[in-house]
Image: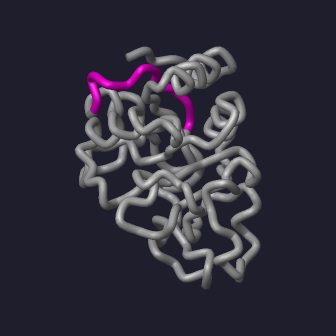
Amino acid sequence: MLVRPADADGIAAAARALTAGELVAYPTEGVYGLGCDPRSGEALGKLLALKGRPTTKGFILIADRWEALCSFVALDACPLVVPLPLVPAPCTWVFPAAVGCPAALCGDHATVAVRVTAHPVAARLSALFGGPIVSTSANPSGGRAARAVREVQDAFPDGLAVVLDGPLGGLAGPTEIRDARDGRVLRAAPP
């Protein structure tokens, strides 16, 4: 595991690791995230195994811009009650999944969770990688999400190619999750 500062060189190293099918950790709006290439079944399998995560849960995708997420969501099946999913914000939105969306991203659901990230490191990582990345909290399944690099290292001494050391955003925990079909809150943001 290579711990790098979340500067231009560190983010570039993490983007290269994603391209090579490796797993990375990076700061997000409220916790450290674990990420991989969402189109790589092998990388998704590694991430599931690393976290001990059930395949039924699915994952969140983040990107620096809405256009990078469009191919994963079925906009025609969603009335877009609230247009907020299109702008960077610390809120994750659940949409109907597009045909062809990798099953590992959806789990047992017909939906996929996406966020246009407002966090500068996560957004830059997505931009350098050239598309969306998986974003799941950096913790073994069911455990407390890491909020510091040391916690990421303790939880995952092996399995991560790069850990970016940078500040979290202003949230006290994981982002709020809302249903894009009706705006309903599925997971509230921490106070």
Residue sitting farthest toward the front: 100
- Residue occupying image coordinates x 58% and y 58%: 114
* 166 to the left or right of 118: left
Q: Is residue 96 above or below residue 184?
A: above
Q: Is residue 185 magenta?
A: no
Q: Position of residue 113 (x, y in %)?
A: 53, 61
- Residue 70 in the image: x percent, y percent? 70, 56
Q: Report the magenta residues as a range.
A: 156-167
Residue 148 lies left or right of residue 169; in this view the side is left
Q: Position of residue 16 (x, y in %)?
A: 58, 19
Q: Residue at x 58, y 69 (%)?
A: 95
Work out whether residue 33 or residue 167 is closer to the camera in this orientation and state it. Answer: 33
Does 165 lie within the magenta span?
yes
Q: Residue at x 51, y 50 (%)?
A: 30
Magenta span dominant secondary structure = loop
97 vs 68, left or right, is left
